[in-house]
Amino acid sequence: MRTPHGALLLLFILACLRGAYSGGGRSRFTSIISFGDSYADTGNLVMWADPVLPGLPLKNLPYGETFFGHPTGRATDGRLVLDFIAEALGLPSVPPYLAKGSNFSAGVNFAVVGAPALNLTYLQGLNLTVNPPINSSLHDQLAWFQKLKPSLCKGQGTDCFESSLFVMGEFGGNDYISFLLSNRTVEQARPYVPQIVDSISRGVERLVQHGAKYIVVADIFPIGCLPGALTKLANPNKVEYDRHGCLKRVNRLARYHNSLLRQQIMMLRYKYPHTKIIVVEYYKPFLAFLDMPEHFGLNSSTTLLTCCGAGGPPYNYDFNAGCGLPSVTACANPYQALQWDGFHLTESAYRTVADGWLHGPYADPPIMHVMT
């Protein structure tokens, strides 16, 4: 008679363990505070004042179709890495800062589509085209955070962010894209890499000084593998492309950025030994998708093809017919696609990236290793 009760007890224990692993249990983190660009924005850009940014395609289907069934301001067909991180930690989706009246007790997201690491006025001073031309840089987001901090802390003092997970980035990708889409060469963009990385490093340091104990810092994608960049920078010389069909020189720029960023993080770890700074990667999982698409359930024949785009092969990307416009449709199976709209990935890809951040191998250390 006692055997069924023992079996039920075992099942209950296993369920509890599974819940703790997947986010159902209690963890170290009670909130997520996010900074970044379109890879993290959960709705800030679409909530920006309409007279400044009229007619954003991001407000239209098929954005959001896969999971939400409607556009949410996320630059993909469904969820982002940040959404999967929150779910794994047992937290709600991180609300955008501009969603006035939202409850920020479990986190707030300052990320904005198109946000650069460097300030808008500085980039425009270099005669670069910045899209969108708004003040949403890392510096601006940190200023929003500082403004909101008193209401986040509510008199808790120096221990206010002891159980908060800060997520920084990615940042830098939009700065380099601004150079490349303004008809500047990789060689002309390269001297600005140390300045861009220094801006990110100083941003991380400001968070430490505000009391952050756990900070996730993301590197940038291989920009030379994005359909938008491949279309804009198309080159008849085959030697300019690697075995995946990506632009080698553009990806060298991204690797240079990522290398300098890691060096800066190492110095910050030494300077602030009581703060856990987690380095996470977008670059390596993207290459893994290209190397072994079938392993991740992706269609190997469309890894450089935009799912939601126009123009057909080789990239199905047209700067005048972007995703969200009336004449543009999405591919039939976005869950098998890597590239969503020419500059962003699909929910399916982001889920895999998030798993690599949570459990490895795309995080140092994996987030789940420090969460309990």
Image (cartoon, grey):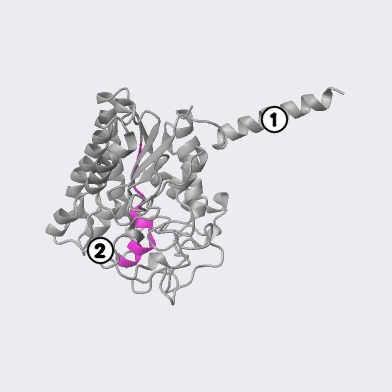
- Residue 16 position in % (x across, y down): 63, 31
Magenta residue check for 68: no
- Does 127 sit left or right of 93 as displayed? left
- Does 75 sit left or right of 172 as displayed? right
Assign a secondary structure to mark 2: helix
Residue underneath mark 1: 12
In the image, the segment drawn in magenta is 216-232
Of circles 1 and 2, which is in front? 1
Determine the image quadrant of residue 271. Answer: top left
Work out whether mark 1 precedes mark 2 in sequence or the reverse, and give the earlier one: 1
Along the line of sight, which residue is nearer the eye, 176 or 215? Answer: 215
Separation (CA) of disc 1 from disc 2 = 56 Å
Name above or below for residue 35 compared with residue 188. above
Magenta residue check for 226: yes
Name above or below for residue 289 compared with residue 370. below
Mark 1 nearby-residue class (10 Å; few <14, some 14–19, many ≥20): few
Picture quarter with the N terminus: top right
Image point 28% across, 55% down: which residue? 174
Mark 2 nearby-residue class (10 Å; few <14, some 14–19, many ≥20): some
Along the line of sight, which residue is nearer the eye, 356 or 13? Answer: 13
Mark 1 residue type: Phe
- Residue 129 position in % (x across, y down): 21, 63
Residue underneath mark 2: 181
- Residue 28 position in % (x across, y down): 46, 29
Q: How many marks?
A: 2
